[in-house]
Image (tube, rainbow, N blue to C red):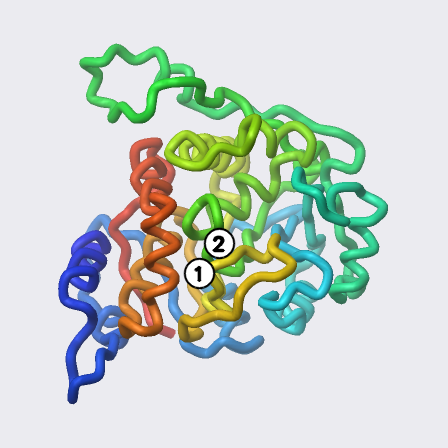
Amino acid sequence: MESRMLRRTFLKNGAIALGGVAVCDLDNLANATTSKGKSQVFFARDISVNGLLKIYSKINAGMTGKIGIKLHTGEPHGPNLLPIQFIQSLQPQIPNSTIVECNVLYPSPRQNTATHRETLKTNGFTFCPVDIMDADGDAMLPIPGMREYLDAPSSSALPRYTPGKHLTEIAVGKDLLNYDSLLVYTHFKGHTMGGFGGSLKNIAIGCSSGKVGKLQIHGEGWPKGTLFLERMVEAGKGIADHFGPHITYINVLKNISVDCDCDAHGVKPTCNDIGILGSQDILAIDNASVDLIYAQPEQQRHDMVERIESRRGLHQLEYMKALHMGNDQYQLMKL
């Protein structure tokens, strides 16, 4: 089943009506017949250390050399953070691995390295090294193909989006260049500007340096809308292309608030916990995560769908496809 068709079906008809109650047919979705040309996205309902380890075992082929584990460590005592036991149990199973983060742009203890390190301690990240990658400055990564995209004539087959200033390079934390591979471990949830925060947001904003890179994406005055979304996607392309086959993705669909973990007062989740997804394809995994949100019963998906659509969040997926960042056709492989 094509992911876009699935989303349209659930938007139009709700889920599957049974006894007057809307339910989602995740088993049918997960067991769809494999067809050529689809990316594999592995799915475990078991949101536990065991489920996480099963997912990682399916997607870790490219994890070699010095490995960074990129995750959102959150504001102090963030109300909807993932259980720290998950990553605390996974990290020792990944040789030569380090949790990596960057400072933030908005007012927060995480804005400066010293107080960011205190926040890490507060939130329990004391079990392994944590590299605040922009502590010693920035490095510029090119965004392959963006100059050709911007210079393409209007008659080009390349899709044209919002005119204006797009990125040809992105400032990342300098230490990102010290890593051979990157595991993108993402708490999938809503986001006040992006509609949703998945693997794309985790690398694009999360690996961008606090003082320069994040400002490149957000822009002066932090305008919302298509331009922000496109700059976020472009930044993510630069980072994903930098690692090539040595980057892989896990999305954990638990504690799915409409607010990001960057909100110290994020609202209580109203969506069901769903499961854990893993893939080597960033577009496929974020696409599948969104589809699983839309597949929830109406009362469960309502707030997340409203947040996604009110921020034009699905444009992340459209623009990722336009920039050839992955495959929007996927096979959900149930574990």
Q: Is residue 77 above or below residue 311?
A: below
| Residue matched to label 1 | 278
**Element class at badge 1:** strand
Rendered location of residue 326, percent (x, y) = 35, 42
Mark earlier in primary sequence (2, 1):
2
**Dot 1, how many residues are within 10 Å of its Cα: few (below 14), some (14-19), or many (20+)?**
many
Rendered location of residue 43, percent (x, y) = 38, 68
Left or right: where 28 falls relative to 259: left
| Residue matched to label 2 | 249
Specify the label residue 104 is tagged with: none
Left or right: where 57 falls relative to 286: right
Q: Residue at x 36, y 16 (%)?
A: 150
Asked whether 324 or 25 is in front, the reply is 25
Q: Is residue 12 above or below residue 54?
A: above
Q: Which residue is drawn at 40% across and 22% down?
A: 145
Q: Which amino acid does label 2 sit on?
A: Tyr
Which of the 4 quarters of the picture holds residue 295? bottom left
Q: Distance between the residues labelled 2 and 1?
A: 6 Å
Name the outermost residue toward the bottom.
Answer: 19
Which of the 4 quarters of the picture holds residue 140? top right
For the residues labelled 2 and 1, say whether their Cβ atoms are less than 8 Å apart.
yes
